[in-house]
Amino acid sequence: MSDKETGVRAKLREIEQAGRAVIPLAAFLRRAERKSSFSRKERLRIVDQALLLLEMNYVHLPLKRAMHAIDPIQRLKLLKFRLETKGSAMESGMQFHKRLLTIFASLRDLHTLYLLPDPFKSHTAFLPFLIEQYFEKRGKKLIDKYLITRVVDEFINSDERPEWVHFKPGAEVLYWNGIPIKRAIEINGESQAGSNTEARFARGLDNLTIRPLETSLPPDETWVEITYQSRDGEKLSAKLEWLVFDSDEKTPAILKAKKKRAAIDIKKTRINQLKRRFFAPRDVRIHKRFEDNFYAEVRKIDGREFGYIRLFSFQVEKSDDFVAEFKRVITSTGFPQQGLIIDVRGNGGGRIRAGERLLQFFTPRRIKPELFEFINSPLNLEICRRDPLYQPWADSIAEAVTTGATYSLGFPVTSENECNNIGQLYYGPVILITDALSYSTTDMFAAGFQDNEIGKILGTSDNTGAGGANVWWYEDFINAVSRTAMSPFKPLPRNADLVIAMRRSIRVGRREGRPLEELGIAPDHRHYMTKRDLLNRNIDLVSRAARLLGTKPIYTLLAELLTDKKPALSIAATSKVRPRDKKKRISHVDIFVNGRPLKTLSAQNGAVRHATVPLGKLTGDVEWRVEAFDYHNDLVAAARRR
């Protein structure tokens, strides 16, 4: 054994003793093959249940068949036939898992998965570094390159092997096991379930050095040889062994809860979980209560301060607490009100309600939530009839007997009242940053941002991940018909699981009726990541977002109920626009009390300064709303009693 290998294994023992269970891949595989092999009866149980879910409940089956020319039902039937007729001459457990994973991967749907049994659950194979993509301009062409951006020093030990001292952030990756790095990413991406080309490539890169074993088989190779160019221009090679991490926080809360109002990318959740453990920078101040969800900071660009919020995840146990904390942050003293950048890159989703309820903070208009549809089937009708929550869909599905419709009518998961019960809190312009790893609830958040015309979207990819569905775990189906004597759902062996896209999301507003699945959200502007972005906190990306915000009007609206003597409203409103956009200044402010118009205040030079409006002889609770309009008579700001 080489000095390098001795040093790394010693470091592994130190880390494992400190509470991080990390072992070489080869050691993990020796016990995994024995523990994960199913009997023929167990394999047939999984195939039968997968057939049932895809035929009767899977909402995207017609779309996937059309767009990818696939027949997963026939493939499952063939697998079942072979299991029934082969007798004892069965393939290995790993081969069976691979067949099922391949069938589900053909759907190109990260909401619809076969999840491997123990001991794969909670285990993730990884290499101790991250690779990210950036672009360089050469004349009129953009050349993509691949940079090492994070390294776990514990597993490198450059002190013992001096030639490894160059394997650090800033080195450019050239080859992966002798394959040009871009081609290696493309090959890996083809095995990923991304809904579009952008998403498959992004996932091929994101999944290149981190492989959650719950959703994919272990790497074929025990180690990887990386050919890279150091920051000094020297071409070098590094041979790194695959490691396997057993998380001590085995299942994130949103996966454990298995709530039917979630929309989540399980694989990305596992990848992010490992990244937080080993690769997260330690110098970023995060709100501790929601440290896995977001952080907020002030970014100063060209002398102007902008709010910047990085939204990692919508995986929360209580949506109301998450919304309240987000509200506190954007209204806190010192947080810039002149412009806000919300960055959701790599956000794999979570609770739909947590995402959709945030939108109201940034617009004076009423938010219209995205709609969701079931596929019409007898089993879905039975499920919906048993739960009062799904009665609107039940009536619609029942009508399909006569109408022949493929899908039910669409209804929101988050009620319109929940989406509007707080109202606008932030009056500066807002921009949203997305990428091809923005998926599930994040797709819905971006769709709502665009459909409700809140602001522009700046993408580092040409599309989002395009995951448009509400997810149900297999346990949800068992519980949905648990009181049925002849329930078609049977327990799965050895903690294996199936996850299905149950209700599809369709858009509202100008794109009403358009499905999110496969199509995603195209950004209004595209940014190509630079080397400075990767090594210096996204500096060029944030600067681009700030320039786009700099062209937008900035409004303020303050309204307060005064009750010292007679009830009155204190109102102040301002607008700051470019000279050529004078028509976007505030022209007047309307006041409504208890649903009725009370008074209109005319603005002077785009502002209403500290006006006091008596409310008359009103008693009891007073409901009031203040609305500011520009010279086009467009509603630009609103405030109301909270």
Image: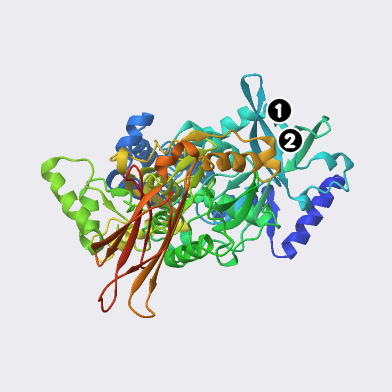
Identity of the residue drawn at 36% across and 37% down? 72
Res. 415 visible in picture: no
Q: What x and y, as percent, mark residue 489? A: 31, 56
Q: Is residue 121 left or right of residue 138?
A: left
Res. 289 visible in picture: yes
Q: On the image, which quarter does residue 320 sit in?
A: bottom left
Closer to the camera, 459 or 373?
459
Q: What x and y, as percent, mark residue 30? A: 64, 50
Q: What x and y, as percent, mark residue 171? A: 76, 36
Local crowd at mark 2 within 10 Å, few (<14), some, or many (≥20)? Answer: some
The kind of residue on which mark 1 rests is: Gly
Q: Is residue 463 left or right of residue 27?
A: left
Label 2–label 1 contact, CB within 8 A: yes
Residue 228 lies, with reference to residue 352, above or below; the image says above
Between disc 2 and disc 1, whose residue precedes?
1
Q: On the image, which quarter does residue 480 sit in?
A: bottom left
Q: Which of the numbered marks, if any, corresponds to residue 178?
A: 1
Q: Is residue 180 left or right of residue 100?
A: right
Q: What x and y, as percent, mark residue 117? A: 50, 54
The residue indicated by pointer 2 is 225
Q: Which of the numbered marks, if any, corresponds to residue 340?
A: none
The span from disc 2 to disc 1 (Cα, nearest Å) is 8 Å
Extreme left residue here? Answer: 402
Secondary structure beneath dot 2 equals: strand
Local crowd at mark 1 within 10 Å, few (<14), some, or many (≥20)? Answer: few
